[in-house]
Image (cartoon, rainbow, N blue to C red):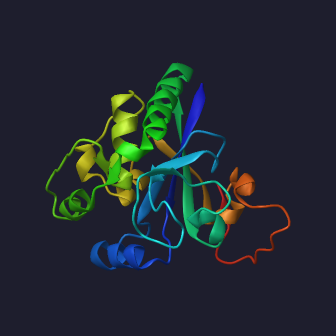
Amino acid sequence: MSYIYIILTRSNTVYSRLIHAVTGDKYTHVSLGLGDGASELYSFSRKRAHLPLPSPIVREDVPGSYLARHPDTPCALYRLRVDASVKESVRRRVETMYERREHYHYSLIGAALCKLDIAHERAEHYFCSQFVAEVLSKCGALELPKSASLMRPADFAALPELEQIYAGPVIHAPGAEDMYMKGASHGQAGEVRAF
């Protein structure tokens, strides 16, 4: 058996604060982890840490990424147990999308309509939770309770198939150590809980 990881975060960006104000959800962003824990993270997110757009499919666990620059970002890390063949299918799908990342775009309309419970799909356009949900569903890793375009980050926390293994600042999440450059100093903040 293998694991796929799902990490929920809530950054201090204007967009994240807006989503939180509208939804009241504890976490406003979700990423898919194909490594061990919070490593090899993929999502639809900001391409440049300091600018909200463009937001195509990106690796979020690399030095210079938003998460690397904001180590105290609160997160919850979950794992999903899958067959090795399912994980390989997920990996192939994500890597194919990532190789063609210049063709993919953030779906602002989809994200807005999701809050209104209106399903909206457009080729090569995704928001974070739609991307994670669709990949997991189409690869047979997870049966969704609703359309991928209606999944919000908070919905993942309620899925019984997911096991929470950590909550606290992203810098202390299992597997996050590669995200941070050696020698960087980071203060500790927030609650740290290992499950």
Residue 79 horizontal side relative to residue 37, left or right? left
Identify the residue at image location x=50%, y=72%: 11
Check the image and report above or below for 3 versus 152: above
User: How many labels were placed on the picture?
Assistant: 0
Q: Position of residue 18 (x, y in %)?
A: 34, 78
Check the image and report above or below for 88 versus 129: above
The quarter holding residue 142 reads top left
Quarter of the figure with the C terminus: bottom right
**Does residue 129 appear in the picture of this structure?**
yes
Query: Which of the pair 23/128 is nearer the observer?
Result: 128
Residue 150 horizontal side relative to residue 35, left or right? left
Query: Which of the pair 120/169 is nearer the observer?
Result: 120
Query: Which of the pair 101/12 is nearer the observer?
Result: 101
Query: Which of the pair 39/117 is nearer the observer?
Result: 39
Q: Position of residue 164 (x, y in %)?
A: 55, 51
Identify the residue at image location x=62%, y=54%: 61
Identify the residue at image location x=52%, y=73%: 50
Q: Position of residue 109 (x, y in %)?
A: 21, 61
Identify the residue at image location x=55%, y=60%: 76
